[in-house]
Image (cartoon, grey):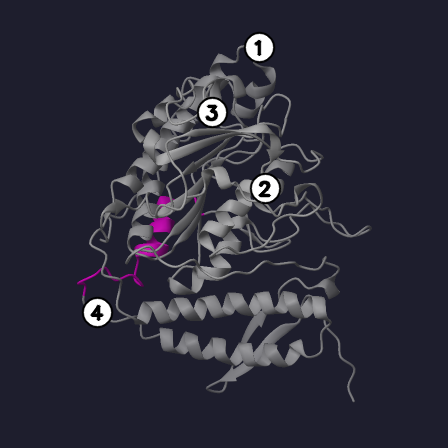
Amino acid sequence: MSRFTLDRRTLLRGLLGGAVVTIGLPALEIFHDPPMRALAGRARADCGVFPRRFGIWFWGNGALPSKFIPETTGPDYALSEQLMPLAALRSKFTVLSGLDVRTPNTDPHGSGPAGLLVGDNITVGEPGVARTGTVIGPTLDQIVAQAIGDQTRFPSLEVGVQRATSGLSYSGPYAMNPPETSPAALFERIFGAGFRAPGETGGPDPRLALRQSVLDVVRGQAATLGTRLGSADRARLDQHLEGIRAIELQIARLSSDPPDYAACMRPDAPMDLPDVEGRQQLSATNRLISDLVVMALACDQTRVFTNMYSQPVNNMLFPGATSGHHQLTHDEPDPQGEVNMIVGAIMQDLAYFLGRMDAVVEGDGTLLDHSAILCTTDVSYGRTHTLEDYPLIVAGSACGALRTGVHWRSPAPDNACKLSLTLLRTMLDGLPASFGQNAGYTEDSLGAIEL
């Protein structure tokens, strides 16, 4: 009997029409990676004929808590200075305060998002193995996508406005989903040759059938390999096969009739915008990316998205600012007028995105009404990297499942992962029973914002 060997260069192989097809293996524990953990659930029932959507809208470098958190609570609260750009939409979102990300703050700008979106701190991998930090499991968006992603062409979309070098969305440890920041490339991916709007004629690309056959061959060979792996590596390989299955489902969606949503149409193809005097055109790019994501949701191309407007520790040069954003959060003297201006500009771009969602009419409501969108950042106060009183906004009521139009403040400092669990239960029919680990662990959601 031949000895079984496996390394990073091992490929999955199969034959199709006499030709060899190959696919590389995912990162496995046998290659010194830690085991992967995952959560699963069922999709919550649709509201009427329209589905619920879930999204994360993220910006880097925090806020100024004294100018971000409203001073009063309840439905008649007064908007704070930094939230004023959202005034026209105040009935469509809820501000939450008094919630702390309880993850140990060992990784400035990293521990906060990991604690809120995964429920535990970043890990640095096994001793003696050269690895950068990673999360312990899937982020909120990917937990939802695992449950409902097979109902759409794209299980999830990851986009950004800043030309990012990293991403916010993870399918599991070391499995980052990088954001697409090019409007032109994003258009081609969603609305290019594979897209058909309602009423458009024409069939799918005839090469799709060949791609289907290639995937079938590779998956069969991979299943045989799985019998020779340990349990942790089988779980990691299963996740890889689920990725292949997602491609198959996308191919199937391309072959079927498009959804007949009245708002769905093929948008005009955008162009990528050049920098102006060394500064990226953030707001203009945000409008292009926002319009594409909103139409992707309106056409039911996806029901899950992550928009990484700007990444942690970014030094973007905002209009009117004398230095990069992150540098200003540390170096600008109080009261940090330029930082305040930057956060206000970010909220204006968030308002554009939410406004475009609210402009899409679906039955008696809007696309925003049928969504739950977590709007947050990586720290509370950028200068000190604090994770207390974390900036949190939830836009949309998810078809009446969540309260909107209020500022709710926890009576005592509480675990921000309760909000994470609330959002998961809203999307996944009451599942899961708990969220997070260690200091982030909770079995309780936020009943105060649930309807």
From the image, tell me which residue sits under label 3: 317
- Residue at the far bottom in the pictured view: 1
From the image, tell me which residue sits under label 2: 417
Q: In the rendered view, would you say 282 is above or below 64?
A: below
- Out of 246 and 442, give the one closest to the viewer: 442
Query: Label for residue 202?
Result: 4
Label 1: how many residues lie within 10 Å, few (<14), some (14-19) or many (20+)? few
Q: Quadrant of the N terminus?
A: bottom right
Mark 1 or 3, which is nearer the eye? 1
Element type at mark 3: loop
From the image, tell me which residue sits under label 1: 333
In the figure, is residue 116 to the left or right of 204? right
Q: Tell me if label 3 and label 4 are in contact, CB under 8 Å.
A: no
Element type at mark 1: loop
Label 4: how many residues lie within 10 Å, few (<14), some (14-19) or many (20+)? few
In the figure, is residue 219 to the left or right of 124? left
Instruction: Give the mark, 3 or 4, whose residue is nearer the N terminus.
Output: 4
CA gap between label 1 and label 4 equals 61 Å
- Report x, y in % for residue 363: 22, 50
Mark 3 or 4, which is nearer the eye? 4
CA gap between label 1 and label 3 equals 18 Å
Element type at mark 4: loop
Residue 181 falls inside the magenta stretch = yes
- Report x, y in % for residue 129: 78, 52
Q: Quadrant of the C terminus?
A: top left
- Out of 333 and 400, give the one closest to the viewer: 400
CA gap between label 4 and label 2 equals 47 Å
Mark 1 or 2, which is nearer the eye? 2
Task: Specify start and end residues of the magenta stretch as a single range.
Answer: 180-200
